[in-house]
Each structure stands twice: as structure tokens, then as C-alpha cells.
Amino acid sequence: MEKQKDVLILAIESSCDETAAAVVKNGRSVLSNVISSQIDLHKLYGGVVPEIASRKHIEKINQVIEEALKEADTTLDDLDAIAVTYGPGLVGALLVGVAEAKAISFAKNLPLVGVHHIEGHISANYIENLDLEPPFLCLVVSGGHTHLVVVKDYGEFEILGRTRDDAAGEAFDKVARAIGLGYPGGPKIDKLSKQGNAYAMDFPKAKVADAPYDFSFSGVKSAVLNHLNKCKMMGEPVVEADIAASFQRCVVEVLVEHAIAAARDYHISKLAIAGGVASNQTLRNAMEQACEKNGIQFYHPSPIFCTDNAAMIGVAGYYEYIKGTRHGWDLNAVPNLKLGER
Ligand code: KG4
Ligand code: ZN
């Protein structure tokens, strides 16, 4: 039998504060994954400044793409398609990647495939889990999204639950700022929690009436702020590590409980996690234990594929490409793009 030709995709990601490019072969093999992070710059302001993000993407994108091609020992002439994140995200930041992808695909006459950022996060699970195929359940927890999604097929999703207010990562970032840890808060809370008592405080775990898989994190965030105010007024010491660990326990318990309940209710035996918060060690451990207890197979990407990267966009782009998804020169950045929309 004739061997199928390899499909090489150059992927570009610039939706927030990382300028990233990757080369992915046949949707599962990452030949290069270059990430230029702007975190040190945005740290000065306590969060991502959109205008600065766009400017930095413009400065870095060509260099990052060149590095990704070089690392993969590839040239633009070897590629089969260009994949790019076109939403959701910061409009100015997205536009840089979209314009770059359009320019390369026009110059080299290559198919252009626009990719949904969250479809990318979910697809990160395919990189190191070669046995993973849909259907499965995925908990997406990033700085902008908290979704419980049934991945029915490649690129086909049913959203079972979503956050009603803050995203999980957003709650981590806000609580970290309140206790003086700085930006980005997730990794800092993850680290500081290891020195704290996760049962020192009992922060509220919100349930949304009639929507068992929806999330709400504004209550726990307010409870942390109230606790800090109370300490200040009463002259009591603030134990940051205990607050971090207790807050994290509360968020992790909610995430695990909802995900396991959905997997059981929908009789789904495979559960994956995705997005920046999926690199949280306590969440990974708790989810692994709960899955084991419930006879569910647990999947997770390595931390480098959880936070924003272009390899995941190359994987999602491959599955869109083989399904026939093509975008034209009118492809635009869509800051509020819905999952499953094309
Ligand atoms: O997926 P991501 O890189 O960007 C978005 O698409 O939003 O997620 C970034 C979010 C931030 O809120 C960051 O604080 C959080 O992921 N995060 C973490 C950890 N690493 C990153 N949250 C908890 N624990 C971590 N280890
Ligand atoms: Zn992301």
C-alpha cells in the first residue's frame, strides 16, 4: 500500500501575551514549539496591557516563526498549510497572527486554516496521548474560559457547563493580586499553597441553581477579599500561604466535582483537562485520584502544552485541515468567537 504523504502545518498563536509558532506533523507530532512570553513586561502593570501585547507580537512574530521552522528543520516550501488562532482573545493581538498567517499563505499559495483558541487548548491532549480519540469529556480552565465540554468528534463540541462570572484562571489571578503575589497569579498560588494549610479557611463553593455543570467563582474571590479586610480591621495577621491553599482547594474541589458528575451522568469514560489552570499540580492530582476512584481514564497535557502555545493550534489546525476547513483572505480576528463556530 502506498504510504500517505505527511501533512506539515505551521501554526501561529498570538491571542494574548505569548507570541508562539510551531510546526506539527500529521496532527500528533510536534517538530517545534517556540514561545516568546511577554509576562515580564505585563507584570509591571499587574496584568496584560492589550496595546503593549499587540506591539510586542509585531516585534517578535517573524523571529519566532523563523525559529520554529529552523528547529523543525523545515522551510516554508515544505509546508501543507498555515493554521492560526483567530479568536477568542484580544483583538489587536489576534490581528497580528492573522495578518502574518494570511501573508505567508498568500505568498506561498498555502491553504489557510483559522483555529478557535479553545479548540487548540482541548487538542493539546492529543500530543502526548496518542491513544486519545473523541468522544471524551474535557474541562477547559484558562484565564478567559471555564467550560465543561463533550468533545463529540474532532472539532465538534457540546458545552455542558460554563462559568457565570469569572474564569477559573481569572479568579486565581485576582486572588493572587489581592494577597500581593503579582501577575500571573496561578503559578504563584500553586507554589505558595505548598507551604499553607488548605483547611485553614472554608471558602464558599458556589452552586448555580438548575445548572449543575455551571461554575461561579466570584463568591470565593469576594470571600477572600472579605477575609483580608477582616484581618486588617481586627489587626490579625494575614497568612498568605493558608489563604492561597484554602482558595485553591475550594476551586479545585468544585472543578473536580463538576467534571466527575458530568462524566458519570453522561456515561463518559474518558476525561481530559486543558488550559493554563490545567497545569496546576493540585488540580492534576485531585482529578487523577477522582478519575481512578470512578473508573474514568484521565488525560492531561504536559504543563508547557497547557498554557498558551502554538503546537496545540497546529494539532487542532490539522484536524480542521483534513476535514476541509479553509479560510479566505477575508479571515478576521473574532475576539468573542464561540466554540464550534466557523
Ligand atoms: O490558557 P492560558 O495560558 O491563557 C488563556 O487562554 O487564558 O491560561 C492563563 C491562565 C492564567 O489565569 C494563569 O494564572 C493560569 O492560567 N495558570 C495557572 C497555573 N498556570 C497558569 N493557574 C493555576 N495554577 C497554575 N499552575
Ligand atoms: Zn489560552
Image: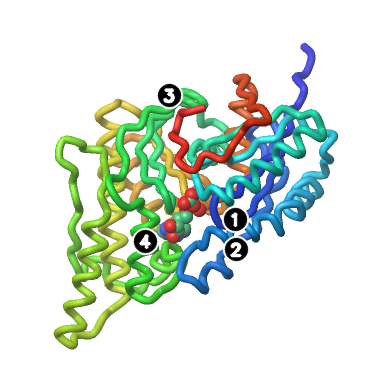
Q: CA distance from mark 4 to mark 3?
A: 30 Å
Instruction: Pick the residue in front: 9 or 196.
Output: 9
Q: Can the viewer see residue 279 in this picture?
A: no
Asked if the beta carbon under badge 4 is closer than 8 A to the nearest atom of ligand 1, the reply is yes
Query: How far apart are labels 1 and 2 at the CA level?
Result: 6 Å
- Residue 43 is situated, as x and y percent measured from the top left of the image, at 51, 70
Q: Is residue 212 visible?
A: yes
How far, Cα to Cα, is label 2 from label 3?
Answer: 35 Å
Residue displayed at 34% across by 41% down: 291
In primary-sequence order, the first of circles 2 and 3 is 2
The answer to whether mark 4 and mark 1 are in CB contact below 8 A is no
Q: Residues within 10 Å of mark 2 (few under 14, many from 20)?
A: some
Indicate the amino acid at tag 1: Glu
Cα separation between marks 4 and 1: 19 Å
Residue under label 3, please give it: 152
Name the front one of labels 2 and 3. 2
Q: Is residue 190 left or right of residue 250?
A: right
Q: Residue at x 63, y 39 (%)?
A: 84
Of labels 1 and 3, the one closer to you = 1
* Residue at 71% over, 43% down: 100
Mark 4 → mark 2, Cα distance in angstroms: 19 Å
Q: Earlier in the sequence, mark 4 or mark 2?
A: 2
Q: Which residue is mark 2?
A: 38
Q: Residues within 10 Å of mark 3 (few under 14, many from 20)?
A: some
The residue tagged with tag 1: helix, strand or loop?
Answer: strand
Residue 58, image x, y percentages: 69, 55
Q: Which residue is mark 1?
A: 18
Q: Nearer the viewer, mark 4 or mark 1?
A: 1
